[in-house]
Amino acid sequence: MKLIIAIVQDKDANRLSNQFIDDDVRATRLSSTGGFLKSGNTTFMIGIEDERVEEVLSVIQEASHTRQQFMTPPVNLDAQLDSTSSYPVEVQVGGATVFVVPVEQFHQF
């Protein structure tokens, strides 16, 4: 058995959740916040049999898309630095960060 921890952008979370339901994948959904952009994410925790891991990874990959987004860097109070650092910059966001870890024991009470 494996534990899959998938962190996806909120914009992809509902589509992924619905696909999990369609594919009979049980997942626990947690709200989370990204550290870089401080934007909303959703973390899915999925306990799954070893033989279904690739299937679940494929579902996550299909439902999670990268996109471009503008971000304004934090205000820099150092007057010696270039003033252009406060202009919005385009960054790539989205997709999924996925961890697959072995499960030594599983209990359901």
Image (spheres, rainbow, N blue to C red):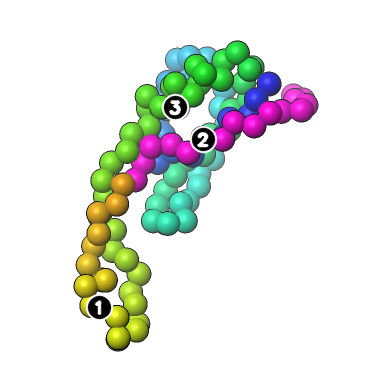
Q: Which of disc 2 and disc 3 is earlier in sequence?
A: 3
Q: Identify the residue shown where x is 46% and y is 51%.
A: 34
In the displayed structure, does residue 62 sit left or right of residue 30? Answer: left
Residue to which mark 3 is pinned: 60
In the displayed structure, does residue 55 sit left or right of residue 50? Answer: left
* Image coords of residue 66 (percent x, y): 32, 38
State which quarter of the image contains the C terminus: top right
Is the residue marked by circle 1 packed among few (<14), some (14-19), or many (20+) residues within 10 Å?
A: few
- What is the tally of numbered marks visible in this picture? 3
* Image coords of residue 30 (percent x, y): 54, 40
Report how far apart the C-alphas of labels 3 and 2 lie in the structure.
9 Å
Q: Amino acid at mark 3?
A: Ile
Q: Which residues are magenta?
A: 93-109
Q: Identify the residue shown where x is 32% and y is 66%.
A: 73
Residue to which mark 1 is pinned: 82
Q: Is residue 50 above or below residue 69?
A: above
Report how far apart the C-alphas of labels 2 and 1 lie in the structure.
37 Å
| Residues at marks 3 and 2 touching, judged by CB atoms closer than 8 Å | yes
Q: Amino acid at mark 2?
A: Val
Look at discs 2 and 1 and give the one toward the viewer: 1
Please give the label number shown on residue 74. none
Per the image, label 1 sits on a secondary structure element best described as loop
